[in-house]
Amino acid sequence: MNNYYFIILSIVFILYIIHNIRRNDFTIKESFFWTIGCFVMMILSIFPKSIDFLAKKIGVSYPPSLLFVICIIYLLYICFKCSKRIAINEEKIVALTQEVAILKEQANEKEKRK
């Protein structure tokens, strides 16, 4: 019975992601990994013994710890991608700010010549 709640929760998350894409809050590229996470959550809700099977194959004695490790690694990966994107955007902002400053200075010099 509890699995139905998690299935509904994963569907709600997927719908929320789609809603944010339609409102242009997210791009499809940004939402791809969140959507994958929602589908994995749905699969684990439908087949709860799959994590036990995977834990036995890997050799983990306590299956919920494997689930937590997978979730932590996944979220760290998403965090890394976001940090990388922020760093790239900060470099672009600095370059654009410098270009604007140069263009303003050139415009001021042209006005002084007139």
Image (tube, grey):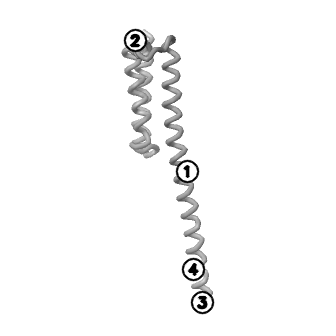
Q: Secondary structure at mark 4?
A: helix
In the image, 28: left or right of 69? left
In the image, 64: left or right of 41? right
Q: Mark 1 touching mark 3, by CB under 8 A? A: no
The first of marks 1 and 3 along the sequence is 1
- Gap in Å between the C-alphas at discs 1 and 4? 30 Å
Choose between 54 and 106: the one closer to the eye. Answer: 54
Which amino acid lies under the numbered mark 2 shown in the image of this protein? Lys
Residue drawn at (46%, 44%) of the image: 25
Which amino acid lies under the numbered mark 3 shown in the image of this protein? Arg
The first of marks 3 and 2 along the sequence is 2
Q: Is residue 48 visible?
A: no
Choose between 90 and 13: the one closer to the eye. Answer: 90
In the picture, the disc for residue 107 is: 4
- Gap in Å between the C-alphas at discs 3 and 2? 78 Å
In the picture, the disc for residue 87 is: 1
Q: Mark 4 touching mark 3, by CB under 8 A? A: no
Q: Position of residue 31 (x, y in %)?
A: 42, 39
Which amino acid lies under the numbered mark 4 shown in the image of this protein? Ala
Circle 2 sits on which residue? 49
Q: Position of residue 55 (x, y in %)?
A: 44, 15
Q: Mark 1 touching mark 4, by CB under 8 A? A: no
The mark lying in front, picked from 4 and 2, is 2
The first of marks 4 and 3 along the sequence is 4
Q: Mark 3 touching mark 2, by CB under 8 A? A: no
Q: Position of residue 47 (x, y in %)?
A: 37, 14
Residue drawn at (42%, 9%) of the image: 1
Residue drawn at (49%, 19%) of the image: 66
Q: Position of residue 59 (x, y in %)?
A: 46, 14
Choose between 34 and 11: the one closer to the eye. Answer: 34
Q: Secondary structure at mark 2?
A: loop
